[in-house]
Each structure stands twice: as structure tokens, then as C-alpha cells.
Amino acid sequence: MNYRIFRSRTIAALTGTLLMTLLPFVASAQPGQIGTRALTPQDIKDYGLPADTQVSGGLSTVGVGQPAYLEAQVLATLGDADILGVTWELVAKPIGSSATLAPSPLLANMPVYNRGDREFFKVASRRLLRPDVPGQYRVQATVATNGGQFVLSREITGGTYLGKDICQYCHSGGYLPDMLTPWSRTRHARALTNALDGYYGGHFNQNCIKCHSVGYDTHVAATNDGFDDVQAQTGWTFPATLTPGNYQAMPEALRNKANVQCESCHGPGSEHAFALGNPERISVSFSAGDCAQCHDSKPYYAKGAEWANSGHAVATRTPTGASRASCVRCHAAMAFVDHLDGKPQNELRTAYEAITCAACHDPHGPENPSMLRTVAPVTLVDGTTVTNAGKGALCMNCHQSHYNAATYVETAAGGPYFGPHHGPQADMLSGVSGYTYGKEIPSSAHREVVADSCVTCHLQEVEPAHPAFGNVGGHTFRVGWDGGTPGDKSDDVALTGACVQCHGNITSFNLKRVDYDGNGVVEGVQTEVKNLLDQLGRLLPPLGSPTVTVTAGYTRQQLRAAFNHMFVSEDGSYGVHNVSYAVGLLKASIADLTGDGNNDGLADAWQIQYFGSVTHPDAAPNATPAGDGIPNWLKFALGLNPTVPGLVLPDGVIWANGTPGTGGSDQIQIFTAAEIVFHTEIGKNYQLQSISSLGGGWQNIGAPVTGTGEAYSFVTPTRNHPQQFYRVVSTP
């Protein structure tokens, strides 16, 4: 296509645009919107659409002959019976256009594309618009409901592809900031160059070009100066051998449309260029669909599918909107970018968009590895600057406590909004921002030895043949998956590949290390931390329950402990990120609430009362200063004087009102007993059995035990059984 013909067509399109400005504009406050749905290669496979169905990035700027998959999206709170019908109209189009709204090829069971929108919007009706000439198209949908009707409107720009040689006139640092120079150093800028020159191996073929060029679409209607059109015009054929020099041998006009460049992500630029840079004639999208039109085709291009299974894809929309400027920097893609660009809070864009590809990766920025928007040092709320986080520094911009407990808990009021912000992983990893009670609480080595911090563990790659592929690892950001069966641990997946170089050949994050919770059993660190959380929870109102519900009635002492409980809980790793710090915070809180400053399980006041100090040898938990064989920890629990011996009998020790006795309703008698502890697995049942002498005749003790995945403890009297053997058998 030559320049003169193109320009004359654009003038005609602009004439149509002028006509459309006379039409009324539908207010955006209506309970719905017309969406342009992205359609990825994986969508086409998953929903069984014809293989030649055209993909779409979900942009409102589309090439002539390419699809805009339109959806009348209404609030999900509207029931199906409340929607009486949807009437579609193409109310304006460019002069010379004969385009119409056609039935959409998308299926009724296909939801709104953006995962974060699905709980808010649902599809009431669909149509397909395929622009046939460049210009502006306005679509209108009238939604009739039991409560009346409302009108939705959307403008679609149809255009042709210009290539980077035209874009550079404005976007190379002359009239506008230079976007072309940094882009030219990205892998996108060499996507086809390197492939044709053989640097990606011999698998690359003509069918691959559609994701390595601009506007490639072989649909019969898609005549829009895309790569395939220029290829046909120039007669270029795909090289028989992929070798250096192939790209440079291409016609110059074809090189202008090669590689992943501006219009691959922003849509065709003809109307934008010839409207003197009108920003309404080009798309700037943060939707994951824009990237997923190429990066979502399993098994080899799975980032789109992985991200769709991540928490980032369904980031809550509650902290977004015009009144939430203080929150949006971490809850909306555009606001996050604005924040990193240094814009003040009142200038952040507050519109909702989940944490998508473009939130974390800068398509124009080659300065950082993986095109990350930043890997600069991060300063946490307590003033700590993290300088060695590598790629994980990006994550730490949001995954923070946002409250330094040392100052926060001394003035904050109790209530439902008390506590650290959700996701304080950066603070936990760094061992800061918890309430330390003035103590020096150590940290584990992860913060020093894991090169890229968060990224090293949470973006581990999973082979396509792995049964958990797409549900764990990569851009799911998950290191574990329950196999789709939450109640069955036998098929759980734990990505421990990043752990083995230091921890050996492990298969679980729940490593056995130390009896942190003091129950006499060395369990996995995650189990130990959960048990400590339960212990601390029972010491906070409502007393006796492991659930912590902070209210205005909490004392300052309780608020300090509650902050630590929430800090460790919200971190979500249960000690994996920093077991020393997590355990230290919880034990310090328990000690403060119980008066047990040295964390030995005995109240300091009790030890001082009877032994003068907490460090006296007779004050140790397992000491028996009265000589009766009963340790201090048991006498403390029973409220007995540890210096007064009980009456030792053949089958136990007796006290009555703190003084040895022989009977009465007020006596305490301790008999010898045995504790049997064994680990259980979910999905299995266990039966404890005993026998007085080996050789057969085992007898069941109690009912079968259903496995919970935790240790099971059984205490049985032994005073009437001088010799007893026990075993545990697994039952169906």
C-alpha cells in the first residue's frame, strides 16, 4: 500500500469520526460495560473453537478484517431471569464501510476474560465486529432488565499497520519521550531477527511468524498491511535454512513489520498517526490478554495459563477506585507503574486492573533482567533497606507489612483493621517490623543466601510433562499445590528444587528441626509454627480459642502479641521464609502474656517465688527439687509447691491441699503413665494395639484414629501393667 492511497482512506475515516461526535455519550456509571474480549490460542484449544479462529489481544484498536469480540458485560449481581434481552446497534461507522455486527463465534460458557472481573461482571450477550475500512466504529447495546433498561456504548478503531519506521517519527525522543531506543534493546525487538538467523534452533517455521511480527493474520478479510500482506506483496519466502543473514536479506518493507514492536501491543497505528497522535485512536492496555495472544499456548508458551492460576490474576478490586488513592499502588496495575515512576499519590490512576504482565514487566525497558520494572533496593517501613534481593526486589515493593510494630502497636486502636498489612513477606524474610519486646531476635539465612529472594523459589519452572504443570511454579507464583484434592496429601506437590542445594534431597517444606512448641515432639517447622500460633491464640481473647479476633477491648499488651500473631499468619509460609524470626516473635509474645521471659514454660514469678531466680538449677522445668521424682513443670501446671515432696507410693505420688495425704476428695494423685506418639497421614486410618508379652494376641486400644496429617498422642495408665508393648497398624 502506498502512502498516498493510505492517506486518502484515513481522511474518509476521519470524516466518519466527525459525524460520530454528534452522538450522545453514554455515562460510564451504568451497571455494565461493553468489553472487548481477548481470545488466546489456549482459549481456542480449551473451548474447542475452530483452529482457524482469529486470536485477539482484547484491544479496542484492531486491524481491518480482524475481530473485536464484543461483550455486553453486566453486574454479576443481576440474575439471569432479571435480564430480559440485549439489543445491539452499530450506531456509527466510517464513510464507505459496510460492516455489520455479526453473531459472535465465542461460546456461551466462556466467561469474561479478565479473571479479576469475573466476580463483578458477567456476559449478557455477545457480538462480533470486523472493521472493513479504517476509522471509528461506535457500538451500542441496550440491556433490558426487570428494573428498566440501560444503554452501553463503546468505540472501536479500525486501522492498518504502519510499522516502526512511522512510529519513530514521534516516539524516538523528538516530539515525545524516546520509546524506540530502549525497545530496540529488548528481546521483543529481535524476536524474528534471531529466529530467522537460527539462534532459536531449527524448530521455527512460517507458522511461528504470527507471534514474531506485526499484524500477521491470514484471514481472507484481514488486508491491513500486516506482515503477511507485505510478504505477499514482496514475494518473500521463508528460508529453507535458518542461518545468520536471513533477516538482513528480507526486503526493507518487510523488516519494517518484523519482530514484536509497537503495534503488536498497541494495535494498528494508522488512525492514531493521521489524527496527529490522538491518544483515543490507539490502545494502551494493561490487560493480560494483550500479552496472552502470544504467551498463552501450552505446553511451551504457558505464562498466560500460569498467571491465570495465580493470586495476582484475581487481585481484589475493593482497594481501587477514586477514593482509594492510598491503596491502589499495590492493587492496580496502572497505579503500580505510576508509583514506580515516582508520581505523587494524588496522581495515581485508580481504575481497577489486576496485577498483570505489564504491571511487573516493562515492554519498553531493557535495563533490568527479564524486563522487570525495577530491581532497585527497597526500603521497608522500619527503615531497613534491602539491597541484595535481586529480581525479588520488585515483589518487595508491595509485599510489605506497611506498619512497624515498634511504634504502631503503642498507639493503634484495636478493632477489625488492626494489624500488619496482608502479605508482609519482605519484612519476614528480612527479620524486621515485628514487635520484639526489646529483645534481639535472630533471623534465618534465607535473606542472605537466596540470590533472587522471592523469584528463586516462587518462579521455579515445571516441565510440561509434570502433572502439576500450570498449577504450580512459573507465573502461578506457587511453590505448592494440593493436587486438586485438598483432603488428600498423597498427591500434594512441593517445589523443593530451590531448597535441595542447601537442605539436601528433601520433598517437603515441613522439615523437622527443633521442638519449638515444647510439646516433646520434634515436628516439621511449619507444624511447630502453627502450634505456636495456636498457643498464642489461646492466650488472647476470646481466651482458650486459637482464633484471634482483635476488638476495641484488647489491652495494649494483648495488641502487641496480636500484631505478632497476625504478622506470622499473614506471611503465610509458617516459618519457611524465616523460621528463627517467626518462632522468636511468637515465643516472645507467649512469654510476655504468661510472664515466662526465658521461654522455659514456667512463669518467671513462680520460679523466683520458690527458688530466688529463674536461673537457679532447681528452677529448671525438669528438675525435681523435692526429691519425689515429679518435675517442676508438672507441679507448676497443677499449682503445687515444688519444694514440698509428695507421699511416694508404689503406683504414684499423692498430695492433699499441697500436703502429703492418703485420701479424701481434695487429694491430688499422680500415677505413672505412658505416652505413645505417632505421625498420621490424611486418607489413612490407624489402630493402636498392645500386648503384655510378645508372641501374638495383640489387643486393640480404643477406636481407630483417622489421619489428620499431624502427630497423634495417646496416654495410657501403666500402674496396673508392669510390662506392656505397643504397636500401630494402618487400616483401610
Image (cartoon, grey):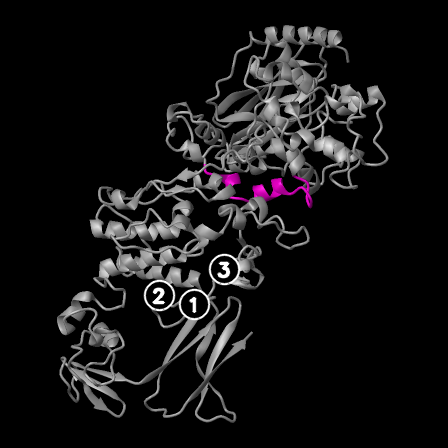
The residue to which callout 3 is attached is 509
Horizontal side, residue 428 vs residue 640: left or right: right
Q: Give percent across and percent down for residue 3.
A: 73, 9
Question: In the image, is residue 308 part of the stretch drawn in magenta?
Answer: yes
| Neighbour tally class for label 1: few under 14, some 14-19, many 20 plus, Cα within 10 Å | many
Q: Where is residue 318 in the image (x, y as percent from the top left)?
A: 42, 35
Mark closest to the chain's N terminus, 1 or 3: 3
Q: Mark 2 points at which residue?
A: 517
How would you rate the neighbour count of disc 2 (Cα within 10 Å): few for under 14, some for 14-19, many for 20 or more? many
Residues under numbered marks 2 and 1 in contact, where contact means CB atoms less than 8 Å apart: yes
Q: How far apart are marks 1 and 3 (CA)?
A: 12 Å
What residue type is disc 3 on? Phe
Mark with earlier residue (2, 3): 3
Quarter of the figure with the N terminus: top right
Q: Circle 1 is placed at which residue position?
A: 523
The quarter of the picture where the C terminus appears is bottom right
Q: Is residue 221 visible?
A: no
Image point (21%, 70%), residue name: 615
